[in-house]
Image: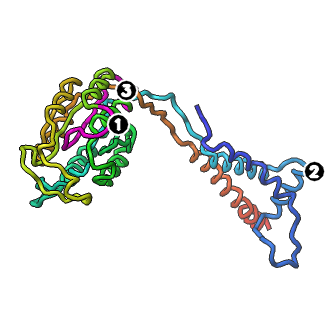
Amino acid sequence: MITLAWPLVLLALPLPLLATWLPRAPDEQGAALRFHLDPNLAAEVARGTRGTGSLSPRLILALVAWVLLVLAAARPEWVSDPVRLPVSGRDLMIALDISGSMEVADYELNNRMVSRIALVKAVAERFIARREQDRLGLILFGSRAYLMTPLTFDRTTVGTMLSEAVVGLAGRETAVGDALALAVKHLRDQPEDNRVVILMTDGANNAGHIEPLAAAQLAVQAGVRVYTIGIGGGLGGGMAQSRSPFGAGAARAGSDFDPATLERIAEMTGGRFFSAHAREQLEEIYAELDRLEPSERDERSLTPRRSLYMWPAAGALLLSFGLAAAPLLSAGARRRVA
């Protein structure tokens, strides 16, 4: 089927008629806009529009060239039937803890100590960049949980929002249950066997309105798998120095970490629990998540379109060359006869 991308351009078809109705500028006025027009062709146009005499072949060719030029500007396209494309992918909702303790510097990256949030950003950004056919969402939580990006194929936006996350912006405490419940809310309407939450935290639930196990039960009912990741080089029980802008009390020691609850959440929902004691372990966790079996869904369609504007444009160009060369050829013929 042939369609026009810009059909309103066809309103320009009667413009040549309007040009014949414009008053001629007097010769003594030098400020008029002037353009060259073959006087013979101008006379033919005037006769044709006033109904005096028949249209000459040259005038017909000029009108056909104009129609072809306007048609080319309207962008004709050949549109084929839509093609359904089966897409294999996952719906991943990333819930990241940005409470005060995430500023603790107990990870080593490039031979220097960095904060937990800095390492998570560095590793998670590479993980996001590999999610070519997955839809991603991002939740940041502290004392409260906030949806930063809904599920989207726009990995660039998700990565940008993650890189701009600021520790303590959502509060100094940790609302694990609220974050998980918010993630389930935005996944429950998605296709089954395709709903995954990646929950990353370095502390126990000590804020919010929903208990973590109650949120896990909501995930079970909605068919959402939860993969929990415990963050912090001090998970073994040691203390880490805080560089939090909220003061020494904002950061918590590794003893606040609650691996039993995270492991129970993963077990209830059919996911897995990971402990990231070092950067290498965190990267291995993301590699393991890469191997999650994607489910096939048919959500994208492609409508093939092939542009055809070059054909009327080429026809108009050839006719224009013919009209321009005709006076020269006729003048040469008259000189040869003379």
Q: Point out the stretch of residues depicted in magenta.
A: 186-210
Q: Chief secondary structure of the magenta span? A: loop
Q: Secondary structure at mark 2?
A: loop
Quadrant location, the C terminus: bottom right
Q: Secondary structure at mark 3?
A: loop
Kind of residue sitting beneath label 3: Arg
Q: Which residue is mark 1?
A: 135
Kind of residue sitting beneath label 1: Arg
Is mark 2 in CB contact (under 8 Å) with mark 1?
no
User: Which residue corresponds to the image point at 9% horizontal and 51% vertical from the top-left?
Assistant: 239
Kind of residue sitting beneath label 2: Thr
User: Which residue corresponds to the image point at 45% horizontal and 31% vertical from the top-left?
Assistant: 301
Label placed on residue 52:
2
Q: Earlier in the sequence, mark 2 or mark 1?
A: 2
Report how far apart the C-alphas of labels 3 and 1 lie in the structure: 14 Å
Label placed on residue 103:
none
- Placement of 305 over or under 122, stated as above or below: above
User: Which residue corresponds to the image point at 12% horizontal and 59% vertical from the top-left?
Assistant: 113
Q: Earlier in the sequence, mark 3 or mark 1?
A: 1
Q: Nearer the viewer, mark 2 or mark 3?
A: 3
Name which quarter of the figure residue 327 lies in. bottom right
Question: Is residue 67 visible to us here?
Answer: yes
Residue 47 at x, y = what percent?
A: 89, 54
Residue 281 at x, y = what percent?
A: 11, 43
**70, 204: nearer the viewer:** 204
Q: Which residue is mark 3?
A: 188
Is mark 2 in CB contact (under 8 Å) with mark 3?
no
- Placement of 288 over or under 248, stated as above or below: above
